[in-house]
Structures are given as C-alpha cells and as structure tokens.
Amino acid sequence: MKKVLKKYYLNVIILLFGIFLMAVGGVLFLEASLGGDALLVMNQGLGNTLKVEPGTAMIISNMIVLSFIFIFFRKSIGLSTLLVTVLLGLAVNGIASLNIIKGSSYLFINILMVLAGVIVGGFGVALYIYADLGLSPFEGVIIFVMEKTKKRFFLIKIINDIVLFTLGFIMGGVIGIGSIMTVFLFGPVIDIYLVLLKKTKLIKQKEVKHLDEISIENES
C-alpha cells in the first residue's frame, strides 16, 4: 500500500477528488428526486429498506460485493476498490448533511440539478477511471461476468443496470426522468472527459483504457 501511495501519489489525489465529485453528483440526483443511475437507485432502495441513509447503503452494498470479488475475482481489487467502498458513501452522507444542495418544488430546477449531477458526477467517474488504481466493487462484478461469459461489456452493463433498477424500484428507489437522462447522457459525458484527461498527460498511467475496450480484447 505504501509503495502504491508513494509511486502513484498523484493518481491517489485524482482518485480522491473523483470520489468527492461522484458524491456531489449522487447528492444532486437524490435531492432532485427524479431518479438517478441504476446503482444509485438500488442503493436508495436498499437504504429505504434498511432505514439507513443512502450513503450508508452504498457502503453496505459495496462491502457485500467486495466480499464476492475478493473470493472470485481478486485481481480486480486495487486502491480504488477499497476507497470507493468506504469513502463514497461517507462523502454522500457528509455532503447531504450540510444541506447545501436541496431539491426544488419546480420541475425545471430539479431537471437542471440532474444535468448538474451528470456533469459533475460524470467528471468524478472519469477521474476515478483515469486514476487507474483498480475497479469499484460493482464494476469488478461486471468484468468478472464478462470474462466468464465472453460477452461484450455493454451487454453485461445493460443487464446489470436492468437488475439494479428493478431491485431498487422494488425496495423503494426512485426511477424517473432523471434515470432516463443518466442512461443516455452519463456514458457519453464520461467518455468525453476521459478523452480530455488523457490528452493532459497529468499522470503516468499503467493501463488506463475504456471499459468497452477490455471486452474487445477478451474477444480477440
């Protein structure tokens, strides 16, 4: 761990900033109350079921999935895996408790909040990917299934999102126009950020690449 921190300290800083922005984006989605991405909807539903805050639900779900990949797909675990598991949920709870971000009674304002969530949260996800210090627990599961089934990333991701949306909805998570917006906008926004980040050459990257490129390699 110390060697990783010393050699890739800038990667770690970028990762931490990315987690913070992901948390801000998550709170924007939650406060807008128009739905969010599949993972957020699932965690919102889990929090509703367990009577805990969404951030706490994130920690619980990540810990459960981390246990799975620790047994079956340990090679996907890195510093990002551990930090996302613990810090993302704590950051969401902390930012929400400040009451700086609040939803509105006007639909237009809430839609703008969702857009802000996509822009800010998407940049956070791009920074997390760019830091290249491991996969988040849920992404580890997606790559594990992809390697076992030899199917392309986007197909496994679609199935994964359908399952998470369904589970979240059943448990009381909110699915709405915000969810539709994230489905169509999140991917392209993150991809644009990644292209721009790679051009900056801020850090020495070990193997940063688009996740869908991994699936192409596995098919060759």
Image: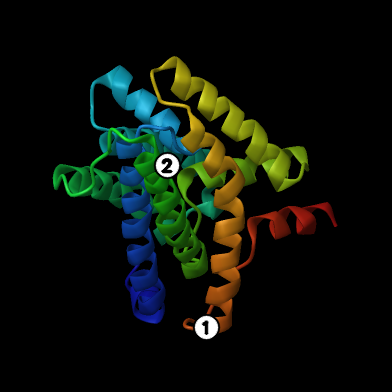
Image location (x, y in percent) of residue 131: 46, 69
Identity of the amino acid at label 2?
Ile
Q: Quick one: label 1 or label 2, which is nearer the N terminus?
A: 2
Which one is in front, 91 or 175?
175
Query: Which quarter of the rendered picture does the C terminus lie within?
Result: bottom right
Locate residue 31: give its quadrant.
Answer: top left
Image location (x, y in percent) of residue 51: 23, 21
Image location (x, y in percent) of residue 9: 35, 77
Residue at screen point 47% across, 45% down: 137
Contact (Cβ within 8 Å) of mark 1 with mark 2: no
Q: Which colour scheme appears in the figure?
A: rainbow
Residue at screen point 38% across, 24% down: 45
Identity of the amino acid at label 1?
Thr
Give the class, few, some or many, for how many residues have Cα within 10 Å of label 2's Cα (few <14, many ≥20): many
Instruction: Report the number of discs.
Output: 2
Q: Which residue is mark 2?
A: 111
Residue at screen point 40% across, 80% down: 7
Image location (x, y in percent) of residue 151: 77, 41
- Residue lying farthest to the left in this orientation: 98
- Residue 210 is left or right of residue 10, and the answer is right
